[in-house]
Amino acid sequence: MAHSEVEPHLIEDHYPLQSHIGFKMTGWDRDYARFELPLEPFLMNRYGIPHGGVYAVLLDTVMGYCGCYTGDPKEKTLAMTLSMNTNFLSRPTGEFLIGEASRIGGGKRTFFAEGTIHDENGTLVATGSGTFRYRSA
């Protein structure tokens, strides 16, 4: 399924961790979210590749957002992570990471999501799956 860029009026203000790390939303729709993160020196581990926690934060974010789209920023839906698995597959060859996730099931109180992280060259570097619980704003 093709997704367009997120409409500017739907973009929420950055929360502090998002601002600090530097990722931004580049796509959001029903059951889908996409974020991008420029690779900066402070995100790297001792090997000179992105720290695994960076992948986990990006996956947690895109998977959480993919189940919370309402189409109306005044009707904000929030979710908390109940469980998450992360698989580290490769290292990026590009200059930024792209996290994408889809809601794959769930119900009124919880949902399930799967996510991927690749770079702009198409190198798949991580995958994840998670279970999320809806909460009120």
Image (cartoon, grey):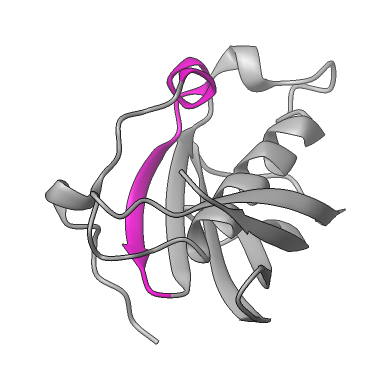
Q: Residue furthest front?
A: 136
Q: Residue 55 sits in which quadrant?
A: top right
Quadrant housing the N terminus = bottom left
Is residue 46 one of those drawn in magenta?
no
Is residue 19 one of those drawn in magenta?
yes
For residue 61, above or below residue 84: above
**Percent from the top left, x then y, of residue 27?**
33, 59
Q: Residue furthest bottom?
A: 1
Residue at image position (14%, 48%) is 8
**Percent from the top left, x then y, of residue 10?**
22, 51
**In the depicted view, which residue is nearer to us: 96 or 12?**
12
Residue at image position (52%, 66%) is 67
**Percent from the top left, x then y, of residue 108?**
60, 76
For residue 36, above or below residue 34: above
Confirm whether residue 100 shows in the render: yes
Q: Magenta segment, which residues?
A: 16-30
Confirm whether residue 118 shows in the render: no
Residue at image position (44%, 54%) is 77
**Percent from the top left, x then y, of residue 65?**
50, 55
**In the depicted view, which residue is nearer to us: 51 or 7?**
7
For residue 21, above or below residue 84: above
Relative placement, left or right, of 47 versus 116 is right
Relative placement, left or right, of 132 versus 71 is right
Relative placement, left or right, of 39 versus 15 is right
Residue at image position (44%, 25%) is 15
**In the depicted view, which residue is nearer to us: 130 or 71?**
71
**In the depicted view, which residue is nearer to us: 30 or 89?**
30
